[in-house]
């Protein structure tokens, strides 16, 4: 790349999609071949998918249509995902992202009650790979760094940042008790402010949805044979 091209280069959501997809492949190849450093590198994949989800909800014209696409992706991906996992459960990441989308929308509308929180965490813990961690991560990325109630936000904006950092850290530390590798996703908190400055969408990534189920096909064959 020339110096002029490098100067004109700006990060877009397209680049983040490519990075998330590549890290996902690295993570799953590491899972198949039991290579720990690949699994560590792949820890950033889900946080990037969660960030892309939050950005998608914020910029979509219809969150219902966005949700339908995610649900179709999740349902269509489940057979090959179950074959890859050699189990009917957990459900694939598409279902977790769909639930995250509903969560973000309910928070946006001010309709996220304590009872719904219990239901969301219970469903995620029972049926999804990332369990409560996935839902918590989507919420924290969506709320960054505003965790104080509206009535208190004007008092001390720094307190919001402190609360957010503590919540992000505790989520990762607590989840790492059962899944130690996920602690390597903790540095994502330092990357998030830079990601949130990205304004351009970049190239259209029509392949992004179907890439998820398709990449499991060769990995499943490797695992089986």
Image (tube, helix red, strand yellow):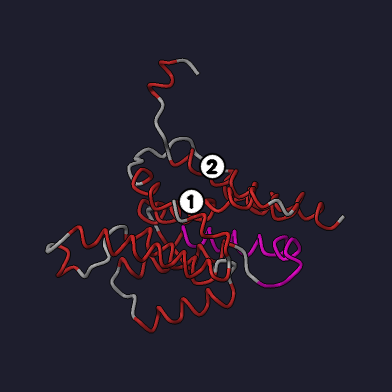
Frontmost residue, 181 versus 21: 181
Query: Contact (CB < 8 A) between labels 1 and 2?
Result: yes
Secondary structure beneath dot 2 equals helix
* Mark 1: few/some/many CA within 10 Å (<14, 14-19, 20+): many
Frontmost residue, 66 versus 168: 168
Q: Position of residue 150 (x, y in %)?
A: 18, 68
The residue indicated by pointer 1 is 48
Q: Is residue 173 magenta?
A: no
Sooner in the amino-acid sequence: mark 1 or mark 2 = 2
Q: Position of residue 13 (x, y in %)?
A: 44, 42
Quarter of the image for the C terminus: give it. bottom right
Q: Position of residue 69 (x, y in %)?
A: 53, 58
Residue placed at 74% from the left, 61% from the top? 84
Q: Main secondary structure of the magenta part?
A: helix
Residue placed at 63% from the left, 52% from the top? 39
Residue placed at 59% from the left, 51% from the top? 40
Q: Position of residue 165 (x, y in %)?
A: 33, 60
Whether 130 is drawn above or below 210: the answer is below
Q: Which mark is residue 19?
A: 2
Q: Quadrant of residue 58?
A: bottom left
Frontmost residue, 164 versus 90: 164
């Amino acid at each position: 790349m020339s110096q002029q091209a490098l100067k004109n280069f700006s990060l877009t959501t397209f680049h983040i999609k490519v990075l998330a997809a590549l890290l996902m492949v690295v993570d799953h190849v590491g899972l198949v071949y039991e290579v720990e450093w690949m699994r560590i590198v792949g820890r950033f994949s889900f946080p990037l998918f969660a960030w892309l989800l939050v950005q998608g909800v914020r910029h979509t014209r219809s969150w219902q249509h966005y949700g339908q696409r995610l649900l179709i992706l999740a349902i269509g991906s489940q057979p090959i995902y179950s074959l890859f996992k050699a189990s009917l459960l957990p459900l694939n990441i598409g279902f977790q992202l769909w639930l995250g989308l509903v969560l973000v929308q309910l928070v946006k509308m001010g309709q996220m009650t304590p009872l719904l929180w219990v239901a969301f965490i219970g469903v995620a813990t029972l049926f999804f790979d990332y369990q409560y961690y996935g839902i918590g991560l989507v919420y924290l990325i969506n709320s960054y760094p505003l965790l104080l109630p509206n009535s208190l936000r004007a008092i001390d904006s720094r307190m919001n940042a402190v609360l957010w950092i503590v919540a992000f850290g505790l989520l990762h530390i607590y989840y790492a008790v059962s899944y130690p590798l996920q602690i390597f996703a903790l540095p994502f908190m330092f990357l998030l402010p830079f990601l949130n400055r990205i304004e351009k969408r970049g190239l259209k990534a029509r392949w992004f949805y179907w890439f998820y189920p398709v990449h499991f096909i060769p990995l499943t064959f490797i695992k089986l044979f």
